[in-house]
Structure formats: structure tokens, C-alpha cells
């Protein structure tokens, strides 16, 4: 892309010089000492000299570029978004200019357009404070009474953990909805929408997050994911073509632009050893392309304002001379040829002022639209972008793609710029499944188990031809699939039986067998069977609404009828347990005697009636 920018700039007729790109091998660097080595390399290159810096910074190395640019007065054109909290001050001239725009204003306008009051913000940690501060500052300025609540989540630093992070996030949201439903006195039919803003650094992490989202579980139609950077392209969303969730991306570089395709074809004819005509171009490469055009235009503006000979004495035989001395030194004591004081770049402020006046459009060869910089902050301004929304289809499985334009300080252009289409590809292309590598005519791999009356093998009379494919099966689940195929456009399927007729259980190593295993390893796209919904299975796969619900019953054997026996209470003791029986008999005799004795001692009535305990009473029968 840098070579393409070189060819584009040198083809312009209103410039007085050409851009010539060269390469220089850098020494190998270790990650542990990367930052120190980067500082050393930049300063060593400055000794030989250059007019300005072009780089793609990140949060780790931005501070190094910022210090060198400000102290040495060496302008930096950054093809990544600005990472500074630079406060506008008319007395300061910004030395860092970002070709990649920040998306905070676009995010706020989109949130207001959707009337969202609650959002989930997933970020890297380092960019959260700056982004949220800018968003709320712009929101307060635009609509002071608008209330927005943000729930922050920090994405894992390791991209391999994205899938686990998303699964846990979706389970937490599902649990919160269940608790709210249980606490509410009214039944909640529609789940609460979950609006998620994803703000990750770089295209690699963003695409890794997309892949994890594609493979995560419990993702439902109430989720709406918005990717706040400009790194996502439509080609990255192939796997979500039949997804139930909503996805929104912001696009500033159109890879299918006719002018760009024509220029690229010309470049391919000139540089046969260059990139292939079919290579995918990341958005960062388009920003780098435009950064070279900005640098060339700024130097031309400086020459027009200060005379064409302003830089005549700056270079002699590829050596920079600054204020009459060779090179620029970050550390003056390193100059072994002469004693010098610390001196900044003499043309730095002039070039920075020229960059502030740069205005480029697509007519000048830019790939990302209009380029202009804020004179106080150095950030890109007055740019436009395209919003692409992916929504689940209403009457078919084909997702709906909606596009509309946005311009800074103007908002959404919803007049003639907005259009909706149902995304469909060439129907002649047929592959199975709904996986990312499988496009557009939908054909499901359906796994099931043989259980009467849900799925059964058809009986074949002698002499009849052998059945093949889906015609081999019958039953309730097969009838359900046939009805889906009749009512959903383009729905086709192939049924196969799970190995061993297994439903699916978790193994000791964490894997799954049966139908659940087929779903997780993407051999099957759907399982249609009398599969019991358990908590463990819900953590692994997503279930539809159940087509049959059964209650839980516990059955025990009915006891046999036995003849009544007054000594039945003795049966558990058994005849062989003589000592227990003797003890029971003894206790049976002593307990009534003890009770009778106790009552006799305390009862006065027995005494008054003439009774004596254990004494024989002789009645008086003498005549009167």
C-alpha cells in the first residue's frame, strides 16, 4: 500500500517533487527491551536525518513517539487513532496528527439515534478513560439532559481467552434476566436488550473477538454488538450471515470502490512483484497509504509558503543538516565530532503548520475520504463514514443488511443515503452448514437419535427400492423439519444419526460426545431430537423453545398385601436375635409397672378409696 501511495502521489501534476520509498534493515529486537530499543532506533535514524515521521502507534509505544515529536519538534503523522488527551490550546502547535479518526462522536450519535440508555462497554483498559471522557463531554455539549449508563468490562489481554470471556458474559446476562423475571410480579415475555460497544486496539484483536463471538454460546436476538473502530469489514462478518444477533460496524474504507480497484489494477500491472489483486487490504494499510499523501501535501504547502528553496540546504548527499550542523541528536553528548547544544528541528514548526492546512479528498487519491485536521489537537476532523447494520431476517434466515451515511457535525444522512437490502448471494453456490467458510444457500447438517416415535427408520416392503437420504426417516422430528423447510425460504437439510445413538454427555477431559459433541466440533449445525435440557448442556450449546414438556414422576414398587398380626412390630427383630427380644419383653413389662407405681404414689384418690398398692383388700360383708 505504501508503494501504491508513492505511485499515486508521483502521478499528481501540482507537486514539485517526487516521493521515493526506501528500506533499511533494523537490528533484531526482543520484546522485553522493545521500548528502549525503539527510542534508540528513532534517535539513531535522526542523526542521519529525516523531515517528518510516519508511524502506526499503539498504547505501548505512543509515549516514546510523543516525547520525541514534542521535544525535537519533529512532526509525526500517525495512521492509527489518536491516543492523547491533548487539551486545545492556541499557544501550542500540535506535533502529532492522526490520519485515523476517533469514533467517539459517531458512537454518541449512534447511541442517541437508537435511544439507548444503557450500554455495555468492552475495552482494553487503557483506552477506556479517554474514550468515555470524550464521549460524555460531547454528549453533555450536544444534549445535556441525556442520561447514559455504562457497564464496563475489560477484555482479556490474551486473545485465546475471548471465547471463555464471552461465554461467561452471556451466562451472566442470562442469569440477571432470569432473576429479574422471578422478582417481577408480572411475566416478562421479551428479554431486555443488551447493547454492547466493543472498543479494542488493532485489527488483530478485533478480528479475534469476532471469531470468539461467532463460536460463543447463549448469543440471542436481544444482543446488539457495535464495533467502534474502523477495522471491521463486511468480509469479516460472513459467519454472522444467519446469526440471530444484531451487529453494527463503522466503515471508512470501501474496498470495492471502482476508482480504487482501477488504480490497484494499474499498480499491479506496473509492479508485477507486488501484492496479488485478490489480497485483502486491512483498513490500517489504507490509513498508511493516506498518511504518505498527507506528508507529501504538507511539504508542498511549506514550499509554496516559504519558497521552493526552503529545504535546499537541508540535505547534502542524503545527510540532514540542521542549523548548519550534521543531523539531529536527542542526546547531544553522543556527537563525537563537535561540541553542540541541544537543538530542535529548525523546520519542524513550519511543517506542522503546513500539515494543519492540508485538505485532501478522494479526487486527490485518498482511500478513506476527506482528510483534514483540527488545528488545536491534530485529530482528523470533517470526515464521513458508512454504518452497516446486520439484523436477523423476519421471514427467512437471510440476514438484513442496512446501510446509511454519517458525517461529522452533521449526524446521520437518512434522506436518500439510507437503503436496506436482504443479503443474498448467488444461489448456485451450495455448501452445507452455516459456518464462516460456507456461504449463501443454506443447507443444515442435522444430527439426531433413533427414538420412537420421534425419529424412526421407515419400514421397507420386500421388493421396494432402498431408501436414501432423508427419505430413510420418519417421525415427529422429521415432520417438524419438513414443516420448517416448507415455511422458510431456502431451508434445506441432511439428517444423520449420532454415533452410538448417544445424546451427549461431558467427558472427563471436558469434551462432549453424542449430539452435543457434533455441534461443538461443527460437524453438525443443528440437533433435532428429544434431548433433555440440562444446566450442563445449556452451558455448552444454545437450545430453542422445547417442542415437548414433561413433568417429573417418581415410581416405587407397590408393597404386597400382608395379613394383620398384632406382633408385626416384632418382625424387624427376627427370631435369631434372642437378646434383643428379651430386652424388648423386659422393657415391655417394666414400663407399665413403673408408670402404675408412679401414679399410685402421687394420686390421693387411690388412698382415700382404701386401696393399697400390691395389697389384697378384703371387703367387709358383715351384717348390720
Image: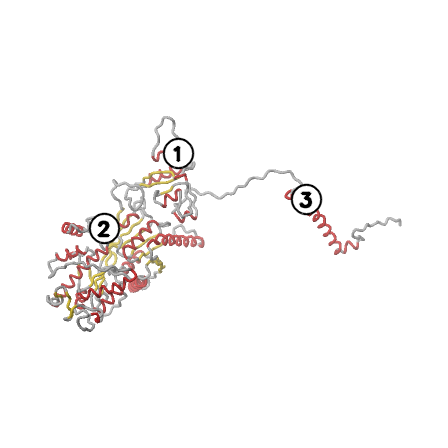
Q: Give residue 308's position: percent from left, percent from top.
A: 10, 66
Alpha carbon separation for disc pair 2 and 1: 48 Å
Residue occupying the far right of the picture: 624
Q: Which residue is mark 2?
A: 280
Q: Quadrant of the N terminus?
A: bottom left
Q: Left or right: where does residue 185 sit relative to residue 615? A: left
Q: Left or right: where does residue 261 sit relative to residue 390? A: left
Alpha carbon separation for disc pair 3 and 1: 64 Å
Seen at 57% across and 39% down, the residue is 558
Q: Which residue is mark 1?
A: 457
Residue occupying the far top of the picture: 463
- Rendered image: mark on residue 578: 3
Nearer-N-terminus badge (2/1): 2
Residue 429 in view, yes or no: yes
Q: Residues within 10 Å of mark 3 (few under 14, many from 20)?
A: few
SS at mark 1 in the image: strand
Q: Give residue 514's position: percent from left, percent from top.
A: 40, 42
SS at mark 2 in the image: loop
Amino acid at each position: 500500500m505504501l508503494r501504491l501511495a508513492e505511485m499515486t502521489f508521483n502521478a499528481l501534476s501540482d507537486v514539485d517533487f517526487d516521493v521515493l520509498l526506501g528500506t533499511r534493515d533494523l537490528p533484531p529486537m526482543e520484546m522485553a527491551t522493545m521500548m528502549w530499543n525503539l527510542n534508540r532506533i528513532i534517535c539513531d535514524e535522526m542523526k542521519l536525518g529525516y523531515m517528518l515521521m510516519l508511524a502506526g502507534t499503539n498504547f505501548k509505544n505512543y509515549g516514546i513517539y510523543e516525547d520525541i515529536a514534542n521535544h525535537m519538534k519533529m512532526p509525526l503523522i500517525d495512521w492509527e487513532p489518536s491516543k492523547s488527551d491533548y487539551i486545545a490550546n492556541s499557544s501550542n502547535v500540535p506535533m502529532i496528527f492522526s490520519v485515523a479518526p476517533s469514533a467517539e462522536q459517531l458512537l454518541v450519535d449512534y447511541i442517541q439515534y437508537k435511544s439507548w440508555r444503557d450500554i455495555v462497554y468492552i475495552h482494553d483498559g487503557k483506552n477506556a478513560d479517554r474514550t468515555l471522557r470524550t464521549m460524555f463531554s460531547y454528549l453533555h455539549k450536544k444534549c445535556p439532559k441525556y442520561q447514559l449508563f455504562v457497564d464496563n468490562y475489560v477484555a482479556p489481554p490474551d486473545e485465546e481467552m475471548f471465547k471463555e470471556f464471552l461465554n461467561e458474559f452471556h451466562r451472566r446476562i442470562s442469569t440477571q434476566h432470569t432473576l429479574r423475571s422471578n422478582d417481577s410480579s408480572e411475566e416478562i415475555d421479551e428479554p431486555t436488550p443488551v447493547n454492547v460497544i466493543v472498543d479494542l486496539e488493532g485489527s488483530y484483536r478485533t478480528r479475534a473477538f469476532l471469531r470468539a463471538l461467532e463460536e460463543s454460546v447463549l448469543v440471542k436476538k436481544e444482543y446488539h454488538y457495535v464495533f467502534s473502530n474502523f477495522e471491521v469489514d463486511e468480509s469479516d462478518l460472513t459467519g454472522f450471515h444467519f446469526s440471530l444477533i444484531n451487529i453494527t460496524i463503522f466503515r471508512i474504507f470501501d474496498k470495492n470502490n471502482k476508482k480504487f480497484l482501477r488504480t490497484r489494477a494499474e499498480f499491479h500491472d506496473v509492479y508485477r512483484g507486488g501484492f496479488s489483486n485478490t489480497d485483502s487490504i486491512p483498513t490500517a494499510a489504507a490509513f498508511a497509504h493516506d498518511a504518505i499523501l498527507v506528508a507529501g501535501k504538507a511539504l508542498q504547502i511549506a514550499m509554496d509558503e516559504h519558497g521552493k528553496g526552503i529545504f535546499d540546504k537541508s540535505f547534502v548527499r542524503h545527510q540532514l543538516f540542521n542549523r548548519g550542523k550534521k543531523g539531529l541528536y536527542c542526546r547531544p553528548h553522543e556527537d563525537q565530532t563537535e561540541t553542540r547544544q541541544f537543538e530542535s528541528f529548525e523546520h519542524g514548526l513550519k511543517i506542522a503548520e503546513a500539515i494543519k492546512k492540508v485538505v485532501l479528498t478522494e479526487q486527490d487519491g485518498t482511500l478513506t475520504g476527506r482528510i483534514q485536521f483540527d488545528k488545536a489537537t491534530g485529530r482528523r476532523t470533517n470526515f464521513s463514514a458508512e454504518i452497516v447494520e446486520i439484523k436477523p431476517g423476519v421471514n427467512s434466515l437471510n440476514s438484513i443488511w442496512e446501510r446509511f451515511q454519517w458525517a461529522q457535525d452533521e449526524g446521520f444522512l437518512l434522506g436518500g443515503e439510507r437503503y436496506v437490502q436482504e443479503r443474498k448471494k448467488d444461489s448456485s453456490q451450495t455448501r452445507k452448514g452455516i459456518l464462516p467458510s460456507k456461504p449463501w444457500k443454506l443447507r443444515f447438517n442435522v444430527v439426531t437419535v433413533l427414538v420412537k416415535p420421534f425419529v424412526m427408520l421407515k419400514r421397507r416392503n420386500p421388493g421396494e427400492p432402498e431408501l436414501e437420504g432423508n427419505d430413510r426417516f420418519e417421525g415427529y422430528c422429521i415432520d417438524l423439519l419438513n414443516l420448517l423447510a416448507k415455511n422458510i425460504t431456502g431451508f434445506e437439510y441432511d439428517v444423520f444419526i449420532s454415533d452410538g445413538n448417544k445424546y451427549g454427555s461431558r467427558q472427563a477431559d471436558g469434551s462432549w460426545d453424542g449430539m452435543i459433541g457434533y455441534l461443538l466440533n461443527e460437524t453438525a449445525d443443528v440437533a433435532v431430537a428429544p434431548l433433555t435440557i440440562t444446566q450442563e448442556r445449556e452451558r455448552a450449546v444454545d437450545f430453542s423453545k422445547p417442542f415437548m414438556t414433561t413433568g417429573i414422576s417418581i415410581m416405587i414398587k407397590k408393597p404386597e398385601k400382608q395379613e394383620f398380626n398384632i406382633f408385626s412390630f416384632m418382625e424387624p427383630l427376627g427370631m435369631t436375635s434372642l437378646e434383643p427380644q428379651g430386652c424388648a419383653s423386659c422393657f415391655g413389662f417394666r414400663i407399665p409397672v413403673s408408670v402404675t407405681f408412679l401414679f399410685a404414689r402421687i394420686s390421693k384418690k387411690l388412698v382415700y378409696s382404701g386401696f393399697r398398692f400390691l395389697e389384697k383388700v378384703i371387703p367387709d360383708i358383715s351384717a348390720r
